[in-house]
Image (cartoon, rainbow, N blue to C red):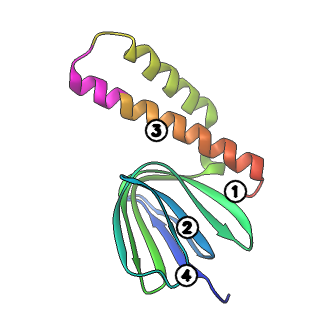
Amino acid sequence: MANTLKLEIVTPDRKVLSENVEYVGAPGILGEFGILPSHVPFLSALGIGNLHYKQEGKAYYVFISGGFAEVSNNKVTILAEVAEKATEIDIERAKKARERAEARASQAKEKIDAARNQAALRRAIARMSCQTSGKSAGTC
C-alpha cells in the first residue's frame, strides 16, 4: 500500500495489532497527537484514552491505558500497559467499573486512593467511549 505506515500495538501479554495504516491518532500525556506517513522520529508517553487509526479510509479504535509511542522509519510502535480493540471491550464490565469508581469518589478517601479512583474512572469512561465509537463506525 502506497503512502502508509506500519502500526504495531503491543502489551506485556500480546501483540494487539500489526497493520499498514494511513493515519494514527493517539492519547499522549500532554494531549492527542497525530502521525502521518513519513513523520519525523518521535517519542511520547501515552495517557488513558482512545487511539484511532485509518485504514482504507475507515476509522478503527483501540482503547489505550499508559505506555509509550515511538515513531521511526515510517513505523509507529505502541508499547501499552493495556490495549483493547473496540470490539474486545466488555461494555457491561466497563459500566460496572465506572459505577464503582463514582461510588468511591463520593466517599472521603486519602489522596492516593482518590488518584487511583480517578484513573479507574477515566479508564472505564474511555473504554465505553472507544466501544461506542467502534460500534457506530461498524469497522472495529
**What is the distance, in whole Å, between disc 2 and disc 1 at their CAs?**
15 Å
Q: Amino acid at mark 2?
A: Val
Q: Amino acid at mark 1?
A: Cys
Question: Which of the 4 quarters of the picture holds residue 121?
Answer: top left
Q: Residue at x 49, y 84 (%)?
A: 74
Give the vertical position of 65 relative to 35 (above or below). above
Residue that label 3 marks: 123
Residue that label 1 marks: 140
Mark 2 and mark 3 residues within 8 Å of each other at the beta carbon: no
Give the vertical position of 40 relative to 33 (above or below). below
Q: Is residue 64 left or right of residue 130?
A: left
Residue that label 2 marks: 24
Mark seen at residue 37: 4
Image: magenta residue range: 109-117
Q: Dot 1, how many residues are within 10 Å of its Cα: few (below 14), some (14-19), or many (20+)?
A: some
**What is the distance, in whole Å, between disc 4 and disc 1 at their CAs?**
22 Å
Q: Residue at x 69, y 50 (%)?
A: 134
Residue 61 is situated, as x and y percent measured from the top left of the image, at: 62, 55
Mark seen at residue 73: none
Q: Mark 2 or mark 1, which has the lower sequence index? A: 2
Mark 1 and mark 3 residues within 8 Å of each other at the beta carbon: no
Which mark is in front, 4 or 1?
4
**In front here: 23 or 11?**
23
Q: Dot 3, how many residues are within 10 Å of its Cα: few (below 14), some (14-19), or many (20+)?
A: many
Looking at the image, the residue that sits furthest to the bottom is 2
**Label 2 secondary element:** strand
Mark 2 and mark 4 residues within 8 Å of each other at the beta carbon: no
Residue 42 is situated, as x and y percent measured from the top left of the image, at: 36, 74
**Label 3 secondary element:** helix
- The overriding secondary structure of the stretch rendered in magenta is helix
